[in-house]
Amino acid sequence: QVQLVESGGGSVQAGGSLRLSCAASGNTASSYMAWFRQEPGKEREGVAAITSISSTAYEDSVKGRFTISKDNAKNTLYLQMTSLKPEDTAMYYCAAGFSGIWVAQWHQSRRYKYWGQGTQVTVSS
């Protein structure tokens, strides 16, 4: 069993930066992990993902602006977000325990077994 706790969300102006953290209770070194986001009334969207050997993948709209990383010693996943835009406003969730074909399916929320409670990111124009 893995428990995930996100932090680092907040309100920023467009162009600003935030760093999200996801602290895991169990050993996630071998787990494929990801960040998702969700706006009210919309489906949860994969933002970025990372494998056990630190290969990464990003949703097109965040490429070049967001960076996913993890610290295995601290069992913590990060999402560094820069050049934030109002359209980045959403609840951001950490996910772990992926199963499937990662290259093609990392962005599918149903592929992940464990989820955090989320942290809100609000970007104003």
Image: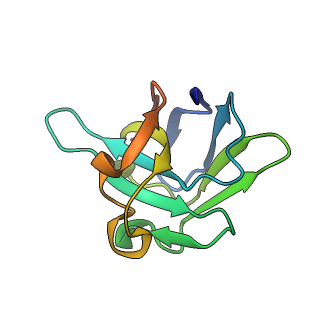
Q: Is residue 44 left or right of residue 10?
A: left
- Point 38% across, 70% down: residue: 101
Q: Work out whether residue 122 can be spotted.
A: no
**Which image quadrant for residue 25?**
top right
Q: Is residue 100 left or right of residue 27?
A: left
- Quadrant (top left/top right/bottom left/bottom right) for the N terminus: top right
Position of 90 relative to 86 (above/below) = above
On the image, the x and y values in percent for residue 82 come to 58, 58
- Point 67% across, 45% down: residue: 28
**Which image quadrant for residue 66?**
bottom right
- Point 36% across, 68% down: residue: 61
Q: How many numbered discs, if any?
A: 0
Q: Work out whether residue 11 can be spotted.
A: yes
Position of 106 relative to 39 (above/below) = below
Q: Nearer the viewer, residue 7 or 88?
A: 7
On the image, the x and y values in percent for residue 18 come to 61, 45
Q: Is residue 43 left or right of residue 20?
A: left
